[in-house]
Image (cartoon, rainbow, N blue to C red):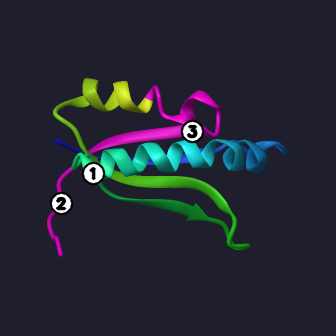
């Protein structure tokens, strides 16, 4: 089952520092998910100043419980980078 995740970072003065500190572990985990076929596409949401303020991903997991298990252990969640997260069922219509 596919899901669209939209996750915005906190807006406090330490938000960018938390993202920078957690980013290497988050990216390493994303590489593993990509290799396992779970991440279809992912990337940063940018503000007008080209700064990362969140993330958006399209992922594929067996069910919502499997997605939540990964999500609850992602460094951007455990390190309080993402503070406004929405998850919606998704169906890819066009692929390359």
Check contact, mark 2 vs mark 3: CB within 8 A: no
Q: State the SS at label 1.
A: helix
Q: Position of residue 27 (x, y in %)?
A: 50, 50
Residue drawn at (67%, 47%), measured in percent from left and top?
A: 19
Report whether 5 appears left or right of 20: left
Magenta region, residue range:
72-96
Q: State the SS at label 3.
A: helix
Q: State the SS at label 2.
A: loop
Report whether 68 appears left or right of 56: left
Residue beneath label 3, please?
A: 76
Which of discs 2 and 3 lies nearer the camera? The answer is: 3
Alpha-carbon span between mark 2 and mark 3: 25 Å
Residue drawn at (16%, 71%), measured in percent from left and top?
A: 94
Choose between 90 and 38: the one closer to the eye. Answer: 38
Question: Which label was assigned to residue 92?
Answer: 2
Alpha-carbon span between mark 1 and mark 2: 19 Å
Which quadrant of the view contains residue 47? bottom right
Residue drawn at (17%, 54%), measured in percent from left and top?
A: 91
Q: Is residue 1 magenta?
A: no
Which quadrant of the view contains residue 68? top left
Residue drawn at (59%, 48%), measured in percent from left and top?
A: 24
Within 10 Å of the Cα at label 2, are there few (<14), some (14-19), or many (20+) other Cα atoms? few
Q: Position of residue 64 (x, y in %)?
A: 25, 29
Residue beneath label 1, please?
A: 35
Check contact, mark 1 vs mark 2: CB within 8 A: no
């Amino acid at each position: 089952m596919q899901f669209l995740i939209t996750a915005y970072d906190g807006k406090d003065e330490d938000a960018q520092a938390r993202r920078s500190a957690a980013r290497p572990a988050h990216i390493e985990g994303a590489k593993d998910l990509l290799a396992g076929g779970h991440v279809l596409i992912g990337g940063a949401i940018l503000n007008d100043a080209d700064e990362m303020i969140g993330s958006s991903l399209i992922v594929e997991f067996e069910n919502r419980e499997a997605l939540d298990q990964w999500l609850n252990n992602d460094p951007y969640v455990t390190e309080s980078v993402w503070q406004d997260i929405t998850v919606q069922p998704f169906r890819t219509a066009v692929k390359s």
